[in-house]
Structure formats: C-alpha cells, structure tokens
Image (spheres, helix red, strand yellow):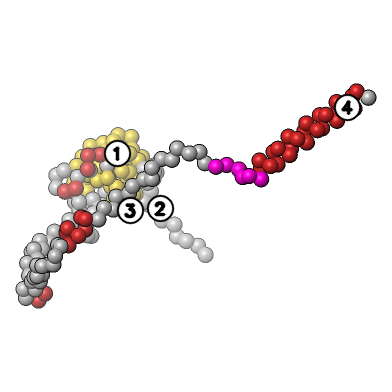
Amino acid sequence: MSKNLISPTEAKVKRTREMGKGEMGKGVIGLEFDSEVLVNKAPTLQLANGKTATFLTQYDSKTLLFAVDKEDIGQEIIGIAKGSIESMHNLPVNLAGARVPGGVNGSKAAVHEVPEFTGGVNGTEPAVHEIAEYKGSDSLVTLTTKEDYTYKAPLAQQALPETGNKESDLLASLGLTAFFLGLFTLGKKREQ
C-alpha cells in the first residue's frame, strides 16, 4: 500500500479554542496550527472589529496563546498587526478563517429578557390562604418560651474517684507480710 504524501505549502490555523481566563478578566485563546511554528518577535493579531489580540506565550510547538477581550468573541482574525509568526519548515503562515472562539458557533451568546412572574397557573390568580387566630389560654409563642432547653453542666465534685477495690488492700497486706517473713528467714540463715 502506498500513500501519496503531499507536502504542505503553508502553515495554517487548524483550530482556535478557549484556554481559560487570563489577567484582568481577559480571555485566553489558543491558535493551533497544522505544523510547527515559532515566535521570535511577539505577534499582535488584528481582529475584524479593529481591536487586537496580544501574544502571551507559546504553549507547545504548534499552539500559540493570545489574550482577548470578552467583546471580541466571534471576531475574525484578519492578520498580524505587528511582530511575526514563523513556520519551522520555512512555510508562509496563513491565518485565514481563524476566529476568536466563544459563544455559539463563534457568535455572541444571545441574552433574552424574561418578564417577571406575576400570576398563578394559566393566568389565574393564586389562591390566598388565611389562617384563623389562635384563641386558646396560652399562645403558641408563650408555650415554647416557658420551657428552658439550655444545657446545664453538672456541678464539679470535689471527691477523688475511687480507684482499686477492697481485695487489693488485702493482697497488699499479705504481700508485705510475706516480704518481712522472707527477710527474717534470710537473716536467720546468715547467722548460721
């Protein structure tokens, strides 16, 4: 199988895409070319509305990043105002057809005014619910305020907690007695 390889005759913009927000609310766009490009003199792009897009940095060997204003969304890039974009393969650089991305299909997003909701369903007035006044002995508000639900911490106790148990006292006294009896027998053995 053989392929007829056609060498490119120019470096053209493959696609433009939004890359996020830059400094001071400006949008960042990326111009991706179909072959490697290089920037030696920072380019400024001329837009169809007379404004410009400022070069920020080279993202990779085929993508350049530019800063644009929000109002430039959808504008066509008509050329390079100053600076230059050079092809790594000594091809002419073509910006034809490139646009500042954003909006729907490169146009500004439409803003639709919606009137404020004033009525009920299907143009009828909403129902008004009236609640009769409570006439009991105590009102509901005073019933809830009579009970005090605040947390009250227990008073500090001055007694130390009881540790151990009574059996340990008995064992301690037996152990002490056995210790002294052992010393007494050692003393007797030394005398002999």
The answer to whether the residues at label 3 and label 2 have Cβ atoms under 8 Å apart is no
The residue beneath circle 2 is 7
Q: How far apart, in angstroms, are the residues tagged by discs 4 and 2? A: 115 Å
The verdict on residue 164 being magenta is yes
Specify whether 6 is left or right of 99.
right
Mark closest to the chain's N terminus, 3 or 2? 2
Which label sits in the foreground, 4 or 2? Answer: 4
Which label sits in the foreground, 4 or 3? Answer: 4
Label 1: state its secondary structure.
Answer: strand
The answer to whether the residues at label 4 and label 3 have Cβ atoms under 8 Å apart is no
The answer to whether the residues at label 2 and label 1 have Cβ atoms under 8 Å apart is no
The residue beneath circle 3 is 14
Q: Quadrant of residue 191?
A: top right
Residue 27 position within the rendered picture, expressed as x and y whole percent measured from the top left: 24, 46
Label 4: state its secondary structure.
Answer: helix
The residue beneath circle 1 is 56
Q: Residue at x 66, y 45 (%)?
A: 167
Tell me the kind of residue under disc 4. Lys
Which label sits in the foreground, 4 or 1? Answer: 4
Q: Answer few, some or many: residues within 10 Å of disc 1's Cα (few below 14, many 20 plus, some between 14 and 19).
A: some
The residue stretch that appears in magenta: 162-167
Mark closest to the chain's N terminus, 3 or 1? 3
Q: Can you say whether 104 is above or below 63 in the image?
A: below
Residue 63 position within the rendered picture, expressed as x and y whole percent measured from the top left: 35, 46
Q: Is residue 56 visible?
A: yes
